[in-house]
Image (spheres, grey):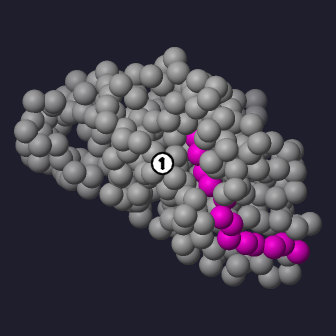
């Protein structure tokens, strides 16, 4: 693994309890206290299990813009957002973070996505003048204040928080961490980040979304207003755009990513992937599960819209009761423009009058 010595640096810090999946620090002995401290203490979280690919060259912006769901052909230095690679049916294949420093696009992703995404980029080069490289850059996230001296950065709204993502050169990780702590900042484990991610209803591909997922199932992926998301609704053609446009203009996704509040009295919490039922009928699948400092056990879940008509209804997950958090349901967006036009035509109304 590139940069293995520097990456996953948090497991070498005092009191670190390692996350068995990502091999970074899950927490430092008191995970709920770490979550509560996010509100008023500058906090750094090790997310160096992500891999980072760099794309540069004269055609880099147009090359990526033609492949991904984010509008990237005219961005300025300092741009940061997310992007999706979709298949022809609009299903999500890859979910990547994007940072641009003025000459190079840095794409960060979960390690299990890197090989197939790298192969996809290399296969699509053709005559584009681009250079695609793996890097040893280290991804960290901070709350409370951004880091100085990063190679590239991205700031985004993360539920009630403002999250600053930064890519560090391996040689700067230790001095950056020392300076952060000397200036009153603390380090928290990945569990604090995960709890904030679940409360923000931000999905992780492969856990919260499956091979059938389309972008509109996770509303935070859709760019609206000041929220860039991962899908730009008004950019040019890319693979899968037809599905995005059809759902946006004519209908709604059959499933929706929501936050669940789980019964904290259960002796054992269900695992990601567990079946969700309502009245004995399967209505969804469980995603990320985490213990939250304020809510107790919470989770993300993909649930059929038909099961969300009564948000007070109790769902069942392997014998554990769960309720949909009503604040995780998207605001009603009204009648779709395309559907309204069709209905006018069916009714004999000329929409141009």
Residue situated in front as seen by the camera: 87 or 40: 40
Q: Looking at the image, which residue is at 24% across and 33% down?
A: 297
Quarter containing the N terminus = bottom right
For disc 1, the marked residue is: 10
Q: Residue at x 11, y 43 (%)?
A: 268
Q: Position of residue 52 (x, y in %)?
A: 64, 61
- What secondary structure prevails in the magenta region? strand
User: Residue 304: x, y in percent?
Assistant: 31, 45
Residue 225 in the magenta stretch? The answer is: no
Q: Is residue 235 left or right of residue 117?
A: right
Q: Quadrant of residue 209?
A: bottom left
**Residue appearing at x 38%, y 45% in the figure:** 16
Q: Quadrant of residue 6?
A: bottom right
Magenta stretch, residue numbers: 129-141
Query: Is residue 131 inside the magenta stretch?
Result: yes
Tell me, yes or no, if residue 308 can be seen here: no
Relative side of 319 to 242, left or right: left
Q: Is residue 351 left or right of residue 129?
A: left
């Amino acid at each position: 693994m590139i940069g293995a010595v520097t990456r996953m640096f948090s497991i070498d810090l005092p009191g670190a309890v390692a996350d068995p999946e990502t091999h970074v620090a899950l927490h430092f002995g008191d995970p709920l206290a770490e979550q509560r401290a996010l509100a008023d203490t500058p906090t750094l979280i090790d997310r160096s299990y992500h891999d980072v690919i760099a794309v540069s060259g004269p055609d880099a912006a147009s090359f990526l813009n033609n492949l991904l769901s984010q509008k990237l052909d005219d961005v300025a230095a300092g741009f940061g957002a997310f992007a999706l690679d979709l298949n022809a049916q609009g299903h999500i294949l890859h979910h990547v973070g994007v940072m641009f420093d003025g000459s190079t696009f840095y794409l960060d992703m979960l390690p299990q996505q890197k090989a197939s995404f790298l192969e996809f980029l290399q296969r699509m080069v053709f005559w584009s003048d681009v250079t695609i490289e793996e890097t040893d850059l280290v991804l960290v996230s901070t709350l409370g204040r951004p880091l100085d001296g990063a190679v590239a950065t991205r700031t985004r709204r993360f539920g009630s928080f403002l999250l600053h993502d930064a890519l560090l050169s391996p040689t700067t990780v230790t001095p950056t961490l020392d300076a952060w702590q000397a200036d009153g900042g603390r380090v928290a484990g990945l569990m604090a980040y995960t709890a904030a991610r679940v409360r923000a209803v931000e999905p992780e591909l492969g856990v919260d979304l499956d091979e059938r997922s389309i972008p509109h199932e996770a509303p935070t992926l859709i760019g609206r207003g000041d929220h860039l998301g991962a899908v730009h609704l008004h950019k040019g053609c890319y693979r899968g755009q037809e599905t995005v446009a059809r759902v946006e203009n004519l209908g709604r996704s059959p499933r929706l990513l929501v936050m669940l509040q789980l019964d904290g009295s259960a002796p054992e919490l269900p695992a990601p992937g567990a079946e969700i039922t309502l009245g004995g009928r399967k209505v969804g699948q469980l995603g990320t599960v985490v213990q939250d400092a304020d809510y107790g056990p919470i989770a993300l879940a993909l649930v059929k819209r038909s099961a969300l008509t009564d948000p007070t209804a109790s769902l069942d997950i392997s014998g554990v009761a769960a309720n949909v958090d009503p604040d995780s349901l998207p605001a009603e967006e009204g009648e779709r423009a395309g559907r309204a036009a069709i209905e006018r035509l069916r009714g004999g109304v000329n929409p141009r009058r």
